[in-house]
């Protein structure tokens, strides 16, 4: 909301319909419907189904934060933006005797139109006098999506073994990318912690990384032609 511009003077257009509240605002050159969801693909999918009955969006962009696999891996740090062309959903499947576990993997793909826009990050800066060099990392499988919150180094190690190019993890992508027949989606997340129990020490970075991800999307939607998405 901090990056959006009100359409009607100083007031955002707040709308409640079919059990969901959302805001209509300008994001760069585009009018968008903004909603907030809780963690997890189920609740995200439920919220999307509600708003799609009203908005019928052709494009859905998820903005938020994620955890990083390891600080410094492929130049990752707090605020690093991850834009994945393809993502893997990972989950642990335990054997009946409980003695072993394995990683189940399913692929999800970002929409081509959106990925072609957001993979080109040249010229992006935070501006506003913020002296912090944010890097945008793109490619396949650099971000994984999970069904539960990860706070285990052992679990991260297993993901790294199965998906060595993974740089971070999050929880909503399966809902955003899982229905390409209904809308084209992309997930853009910035690293806010390292996926361990020490989230308290990373707390100051949470708001910053949220801002970074939102600013990047605002930057792209401000610089592409006004009809670029609509005519596609």
Image (cartoon, rainbow, N blue to C red):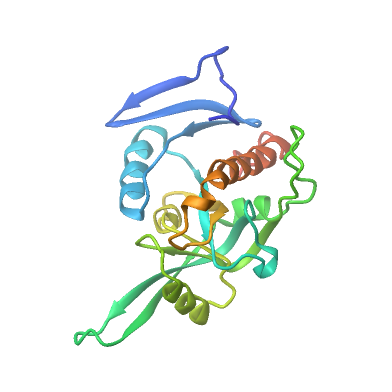
Quadrant in the rendering for residue 222: top right
Drawn side of residue 94 relative to residue 209, left or right: left
Drawn side of residue 156 relative to residue 148, left or right: right
Drawn side of residue 48 relative to residue 163, left or right: left
Quadrant in the rendering for residue 116: bottom right
Say above or below: 41 vs 153: above
Q: Position of residue 53 (x, y in %)?
A: 34, 36
Looking at the rendered structure, the number of numbered marks drawn on it comes to 0
The one of 191 and 42 positioned closer to us in this rendering: 191
Drawn side of residue 227 relative to residue 51, left or right: right
Q: Residue at x 36, y 54 (%)?
A: 41
Q: Position of residue 27 (x, y in %)?
A: 60, 32
Q: Residue at x 23, y 84 (%)?
A: 98
Say above or below: 55 vs 38: above
Q: Residue at x 47, y 75 (%)?
A: 159
Q: Position of residue 161 (x, y in %)?
A: 51, 82
Quadrant in the rendering for residue 89: bottom left
The one of 102 and 149 positioned closer to us in this rendering: 149
**Can you see residue 185?**
no
Say above or below: 57 vs 18: below
> Farthest residue in the right direction?
123
Q: Position of residue 164 (x, y in %)?
A: 57, 78
Say above or below: 87 vs 101: above
Placement of the C terminus among the 4 image quadrants: top right
**Can you see residue 4?**
yes
The one of 33 and 36 positioned closer to us in this rendering: 36
> Farthest residue in the left direction?
96
The one of 139 and 102 positioned closer to us in this rendering: 102
């Amino acid at each position: 909301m901090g990056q959006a511009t009100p359409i009607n003077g100083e007031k955002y257009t707040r709308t409640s319909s079919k059990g969901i509240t959302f805001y209509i605002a300008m994001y760069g050159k585009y009018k968008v419907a903004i909603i907030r969801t809780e963690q997890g693909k189920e609740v995200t999918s439920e919220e999307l189904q509600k708003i799609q009955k009203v908005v019928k969006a052709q494009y859905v962009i998820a903005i938020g934060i994620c955890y990083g696999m390891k600080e410094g891996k492929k130049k990752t740090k707090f605020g690093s933006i991850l834009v994945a062309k393809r993502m893997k959903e990972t989950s642990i499947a335990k054997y009946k005797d409980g003695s072993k576990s394995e990683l189940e993997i399913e692929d999800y793909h970002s929409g081509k139109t959106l990925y072609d826009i957001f993979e080109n990050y040249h010229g992006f800066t935070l501006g506003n006098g913020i002296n912090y060099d944010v890097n945008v990392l793109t490619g396949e499988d650099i971000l994984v999506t999970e069904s539960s919150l990860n706070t285990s180094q052992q679990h991260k190690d297993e993901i790294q073994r199965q998906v060595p190019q993974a740089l971070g993890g999050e929880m909503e992508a399966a809902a955003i990318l899982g229905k390409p027949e209904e809308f084209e989606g992309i997930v853009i997340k910035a690293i806010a912690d390292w996926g361990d129990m020490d989230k308290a020490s990373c707390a100051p970075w949470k708001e910053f990384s949220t801002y970074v991800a939102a600013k990047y999307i605002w930057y792209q939607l401000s610089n592409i032609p006004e009809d670029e998405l609509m005519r596609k």
